[in-house]
Image (tube, helix red, strand yellow):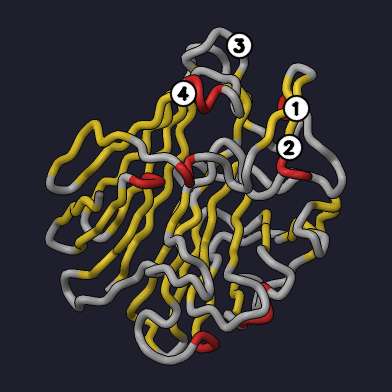
Amino acid sequence: MIYTIKNDRLSVNVSDFKAELHSIVSVKNGREYLWQGDEQFWRDRAIIPFPVCCRLTDNKYIYNGKTYEMRPHGFLQASTPAVVEKTDDSITLRLESNDELKAIYPFDFTLDVKYTLVDNAVKHEITVYNNGDVMMYFSTGGHPGINIPFCGGKFEDYYIEFPEAGDVKMVYLTDERFRTGEYVDFPLRDGKYLDMVHSLFDRDAIFLVGTGSKAILRNRNNANEAVIVDHSASNCPYLGMWHKPLTEAPYCCIEPFFGTPSLDGVVDDIAKKDDIVALSAGESFRLAFDIIIED
């Protein structure tokens, strides 16, 4: 089912299937800023990876000596969380562990996904509760696809500004889209700009460190409009960017992540996986980021 939340700046649709954003429309100009899905390029719009980000080698991981299977980005993509709270400008959806999920992920958890509109921002909160009595291991993040173009022009007219960028490195991926363990220099234009060209994604996603907490997507011919992904509330260690490789897909996913693909050829022990979140019994973890529309 599709639910609508709205204020005087934005009208936003959310699906209970996958707890996924389905639309971000400006009340002022009527423009759609969120990718609307297309089987040719990517059928989804803004998935939420959980309890893994990206690919596991052979779609498997190990916990306590037992091997489990897990699809890329985890099982939330095949789940329908319950709506537990809804107001005019916010909605909260909840997924809880059950016997079926524990067969592939043996932890007791509650996952809350909340969307709240504040002025021109879609505030996105992912909260994980460890309801069990053992340490819980997971990765999560955001994966919103942003329409390009969203204010005229062509894909190559757009760029991302990283105003807080430092020494930016890229996680090097194999052709099979797994990590090698290497970090390589990823120079930005003038130290803070990344120009949008489709060939950026010929080898799949780009995972960056050192970009800072803000990514500002603009059209070089219309600097008054922008889509800003701001994860300063969580300072995610990685920022991913992606569209379907070897295509001219008209979108770019901007992805604040706690997690990365597995190392090439390594079936991870999830308790030892790089950048895994380890959550103690009875504790909670919160990832928050904003999608801000400057219109």
Mark 4 and mark 2: Cα distance apart in space: 19 Å
Task: Say which residue label 4 marks.
Answer: 97
**Distance (Cα) linking label 1 and label 3:** 18 Å
Proximity of marks 1 and 2: CB atoms separated by less than 8 Å: yes
Residue with the mark numbered 1:
67
Task: Characterize the local packing of mark 1: few (<14), some (14-19) or many (20 or more) Cα atoms within 10 angstroms.
Answer: some
Q: Mark 3 points at which residue?
A: 134
**Seen in the image, is 230 located left or right of residue 281?**
left
Amino acid type for the residue under numbered disc 3: Val
Q: Is residue 96 above or below residue 55?
A: above
- Which residue corresponds to the image point at 63% horizontal and 50% vertical from the top-left? 238
The quarter of the picture where residue 172 lies is bottom right
User: Amino acid type of disc 1?
Assistant: Thr
Q: Which of marks 1 and 3 is nearer the N terminus?
A: 1
Q: Nearer the viewer, residue 10 or 295?
A: 10
**Quadrant in which residue 4 is drawn:** bottom left
10 Å crowding of disc 4: few (<14), some (14-19), many (20+): some
Quadrant of the frame with the C terminus: bottom left
Secondary-structure class at tag 1: strand
Residue at disc 3, secondary structure: loop
Q: Tag 2: Cα neighbours inside 10 Å, few (<14), some, or many (≥20)?
A: many
- Among numbered discs 4 and 2, the one appearing first in the sequence: 2
Q: Which residue is drawn at 26% across and 76% down?
A: 31
Q: Which-is-in-front pick, marks 3 and 2?
A: 2
* x, y percent for residue 109: 47, 22
Question: Horizontally, is 247 left or right of 221 in the view?
Answer: right
Return the residue nearer the eye: 236 or 142.
142
How far, Cα to Cα, is label 4 from label 3? Answer: 15 Å
Q: Name the residue under label 2.
A: 60
Mark 4 vs mark 3: which is more N-terminal? 4
Element marked by disc 4? loop
